Image (cartoon, grey):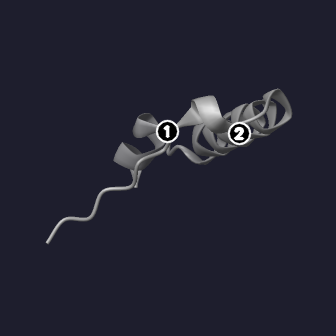
C-alpha cells in the first residue's frame, strides 16, 4: 500500500523556507559534483 505525505510549505515560516531552499541547493550541488563524467566512464 502506497503512503503519501502531505507537505504544505505555506505552514512554514520564512526562516524555515530559506533553510529548506539552502538544503535543496546544497544537495543539488552535491549531486552535480558527484556526477560521473560520461566520457570518463566510457574510457574504463
Which residue shows up at 26% across the image and 64% down it? 3
- Left or right, 28 with respect to 15, comes to left
- Left or right, 13 with respect to 27, comes to right
Q: Which mark is residue 16?
A: none
Which residue shows up at 40% across the image and 55% down it? 44
Foreground of the two, 28 or 15: 15
Identify residue for label 2. 20
The N terminus sits in image quarter? bottom left
- Helix or strand or loop: what does disc 2 sit on? helix
Which residue shows up at 71% across the image and 39% down it? 20
Tally the marks: 2
- Location of residue 34 in the rendering, given as x and y in whole percent from the top left corner: 60, 48
Which label sits in the foreground, 1 or 2?
2
- Left or right, 44 with respect to 2, comes to right
Identify residue for label 1. 37
Q: Which residue is outermost to the right?
A: 15
Mark closest to the chain's N terminus, 1 or 2: 2
Q: Which residue is outermost to the left?
A: 1
- Location of residue 40 in the rendering, given as x and y in whole percent from the top left corner: 47, 43
Mark 2 nearby-residue class (10 Å; few <14, some 14–19, many ≥20): some
- Location of residue 17 in the rendering, given as x and y in whole percent from the top left corner: 73, 32
- Location of residue 23 in the rendering, given as x and y in whole percent from the top left corner: 73, 43
- Helix or strand or loop: what does disc 1 sit on? loop
Foreground of the two, 13 or 40: 13
Amino acid at each position: 500500500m502506497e503512503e503519501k505525505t502531505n507537505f504544505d510549505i505555506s505552514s512554514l515560516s520564512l526562516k524555515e523556507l530559506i533553510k529548506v531552499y539552502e538544503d535543496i541547493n546544497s544537495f543539488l550541488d552535491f549531486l552535480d559534483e558527484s556526477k560521473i563524467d560520461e566520457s570518463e566512464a566510457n574510457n574504463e
